[in-house]
Image (cartoon, grey):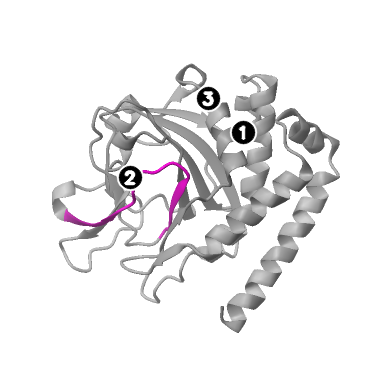
Amino acid sequence: MSTPRLSSALKLAIGRWLHLTWLLRSRHFRRNLKACGLSPRELMRSMSHSVRYLRQCERRRDPYPVVVVDGFLDGRMMTLVSQSFPGSDDMEDMPVERTRNAMARRNRKLFRLNPESLEGLSVDRAAFWDVFSAFIDLLSPEMMHALPDPAPDMRVESFQSGFKVRKDLWMDRGGFQISPHTDGVQKYATFLLYCSAHPSLEQEGTSVFVPKDNGFRSWNGKQFKFDDFDEVFRAPYRKNLVFGFRKTDNSFHGKYPGEATVEARKTISITVQSKRLFKV
């Protein structure tokens, strides 16, 4: 690791430790840890695992910054995610303010990881997702640090306003699709944690696209036709794998129409957004 990256890693570790120390002083947080069967030591062990895998992950610079982290969570944390994932009855249809894509609204269920939604879950599941949300907040600077730097000619949102992290749980059925787009202007980066394990889902990961019209860029997140793009990479849809990317004006990605599969495609979406432009 180069000296600047080593210095940044040290700063991240100090910040993470201070944040965790503050969290563990909270009786509410300690009570939730206990309710989901985790000790502070186990939480720290899980965090160390994820940091190690982020620092060793596959990085791609072209056509835009991408990371692939296979084995992002340790076994204990991944088991709790699987056991606690809400059923479709606990989730809402994808609302129009999130997407105008009719296929997404028809074939995707959404659970917003926020206090209001957690009130509808059982006590133990709500406790786990509260802990998991804090866990991701602790890791989010490290996740951003794992991404390669964007090329100088790429447009990106400025970090000047600071950032907030939105966490969503998705459940997709066969038929879900979303054509190439670069994501909303409020985003710094998106990380997708795949949570289903059935072999039939292996080819159902997110695709990276490049426009056939060389040099074409889009900043506003508009969706374009598949026929106008070439697929250059597809993340394997594998349980406990994270596909992440930096939002740029050429971060075209999408999902080809899904096949009917035995198991639903469960995913945790982690979006790092500008505080100034944050969308719930």
Picture disc at residue 185: none
Q: In this view of the protein, which residue sits in the foreground, 45 or 168?
A: 45
Query: As displayed, is residue 17 above or below residue 279?
Result: below
**Residue 146 visible (yes or no):** yes
Query: Which numbered mark, 1 or 2, is in the foreground of this view?
Result: 2
Label 3 to label 2: alpha-carbon separation: 21 Å
- Is 151 within the magenta? no
Q: Which residue is mark 3?
A: 86
Q: Tag 1's secondary structure?
A: loop
User: Mark 1 vs mark 2: which is more N-terminal?
Assistant: 1
Picture disc at residue 114: 1
User: Tags 1 and 2 in contact by the CB under 8 Å rule?
Assistant: no
Q: What's the amino acid at mark 3?
A: Pro
Q: Position of residue 256 (x, y in %)?
A: 24, 42
**In this rendering, position of residue 33 left or right of residue 122:** right
Q: Position of residue 12 (x, y in %)?
A: 67, 65
Q: In this view of the protein, which residue sits in the foreground, 140 or 234?
A: 234
Q: What's the amino acid at mark 1?
A: Asn
